[in-house]
Amino acid sequence: MNLKYNLSPILYNRFPTREVKVGDIGIGGNNPIRVQSMTTSDTCDTESTVKQIVELSNVGCEIVRLTVPSMSSAENLPSIREKLRNLNVNVPIVADIHFTPSVALKVVEYVEKIRINPGNFADKKKFAEKEYSDKEYSLELERISEIFLPLVKRCKELGVAMRIGTNHGSLSDRIMNRYGDTPMGMVESAMEFIKIAETENYKDIIVSMKASNPQVMVGAYRLLVSRFIEENLNYPLHLGVTEAGDGRDGRIKSSIGIGALLDDGIGDTIRVSLTEDSIYEIPVAQKLVHKYNNKNFNDEYLKKFDFEEFRNPFSYEKCKTESYWLGDYKIGENYPVRIESEIALNDLNKDTIIKIITENAISVESQKFEIFHFRVSTLTELNIIENMKKIILNKGFFSVELDFHKFEDIFKFSENLLLFEKICIPFKLINLNSDDFFVLHNKLSSYKKSIEIIIDLEDLHSLATFLEKIKSTENIVISLNTKSERYISEYRILASILNNKKIPILLSIESEDFENAILDVSKNLGSLLLDGIGNSIRIKIPKTEISHLLSFSYDILQAVRLRTTKTEFISCPSCGRTLFNLQDTTARIKDKTGHLKGVKIAIMGCIVNGPGEMADADFGYVGAGPGKVHLYLGKEIVSKNINSEIADEKLIELIKSNGKWVDP
């Protein structure tokens, strides 16, 4: 497989795409990465729709999408356009089409861009299982061409752009039977429609590969770009994590999926999909694109490193490492990604620290820290930590970072160190004398103690030589001392160097404040974890309660599907198709089911993005009509047209009947 999916895995270069004009807004080419969103109103409701478009435009939304599910909603677009002109609002409008080619042909007259979903534009999903011969498959494509080409021709005549928007949850039965529910299937679904459009030399196309699972989403976009490179295509890319949810979870998921790709140089326009009012999506999107639109990265220092690709960037595979001891259990290999804290001695007294550790110590039943990390620069501080460890023995594992000025000081107090599960040593202190380090390492390893080597980027060149000198790398973990904006690239370089050594990596990261961390830390850690890099994580944010750091750490791991410690909600952002108040419904269901650890519940306003997305969920709650709800078990509908007044209780009954319920 061709592993090339961008210009460089470590040097920032935006993947070059053609420019596609959406009204007066250029997407791709040398244009900035554009921010867009979608109204949640009924498109037949002119006043509400215009109000939302104006509000979105006022907060910086550059392109607005409307759902157009029916001919009546298509016929109302001229009224919406007229009111917008009277208000001097010129934001380009996109029509979102599912299932209805006839509506697409009508609406194209009134918009700057049209979005079609290749999974349902010419097909209604029946979950039919069928083996397609090459001839049968070809005949299906001919049938689709006959339906799709009239729209392509009309878009070309009018100068209207098109988004071919593949969705992981709504792949056609034809694609599912040949390629499965996979990133490859998503790419093939889009490529079929691209090739049909190109028969008319129509190239005002933008492409998306959306999924609610960031692992699937990132793999699909990278695979698509790899395909573009192979076939010399350069269509702009629209990024988004669909059904990301609300609140912090929605922002974390979006930051990981969108941010990882932006850092790869992939993406020309983005939409952050939150189960909130659309205006709240815009600040999140603007923060995600800001540094890529407004900053030239200084990557010169990265050019001196030889990067050897060691990942499969298209599908999650954990990097192969050895394991090391942490108390009575191990980190590395296929063990879960572990969670560390960092507690500053100078900010807290001993009694306060003991209370924090007791409340947040390791537990297999809930979110708990698995190791408590302290920076120690004097023997007095080391004795304080040692005394605390003796008082609260077995309440949690302890890590001490030794900031002594001489290696001799570390070695002198090696007996004191036997009480701690992990000893952290800055690389510069041990680089001068590997013999001393080997003696200390050998002694600590015999007691199942591990050593974390903390290195600066400039020491990466000498790291491999140092590791050769010390021969045994058992019970060693390595982390980077970095606050760089090129955090992802630096850790990729470290992982490449350590690949043959199979040494575990700790992802240590700092942020100035919690609000920025939700986006930046999520993006940096999430991207590396999706690469399979990282065996434990340690987040430091000044003036942030340790309980917030704890839940934030687990939220990131759950978003990348590596550890599940709470209920997973897959909720769409609402649109004009939504048949109930999605925000209130989501909040209500979360309140009733949020204690079900590991259970995945999809809450959908309509069937457009399900039931395929619900195949990734255990249960689905889907709007079926005014005041009516369908319930799903996986992708199978099990109860139809339930009155919304009793739908919550019926969902709980369904969860109970399938053995997934526990009392709160």
Image (cartoon, rainbow, N blue to C red):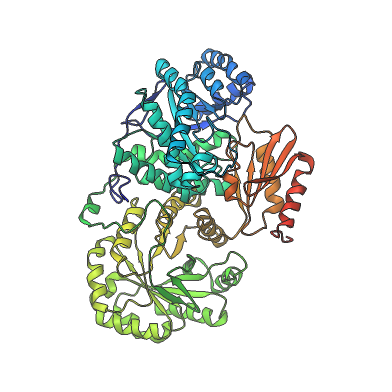
In the image shown, does 69 or 9 lie closer to the viewer?
Answer: 69
Residue at x 70% of width, y 50% of height: 591
Residue 112 appears in the rendering: no
The number of callouts visible is 0
Q: Where is residue 257 in the image (x, y as percent from the top left)?
A: 46, 47
Q: In which quarter of the image is residue 438?
A: bottom left
Q: In this view, does 406 lie to the left or right of 169?
A: left
Q: In which quarter of the image is the C terminus?
A: bottom right
Q: Position of residue 123 (x, y in %)?
A: 55, 32
Q: Is residue 459 left or right of residue 316?
A: left
Q: In this view, does 562 lie above or below 112?
A: below
Q: Is residue 205 above or below residue 239?
A: above
Residue at x 34% of width, y 41% of height: 227
Residue at x 33% of width, y 39% of height: 228
In the image shown, does 16 or 278 lie closer to the viewer?
Answer: 16
Q: Is residue 492 above or below residue 417?
A: above
Residue 233 appears in the rendering: yes
Q: Where is residue 606 in the image (x, y as percent from the top left)?
A: 64, 36
Q: Position of residue 69 (x, y in %)?
A: 60, 26
Q: In which quarter of the image is residue 81?
A: top right
Q: Is residue 339 above or below residue 629?
A: below
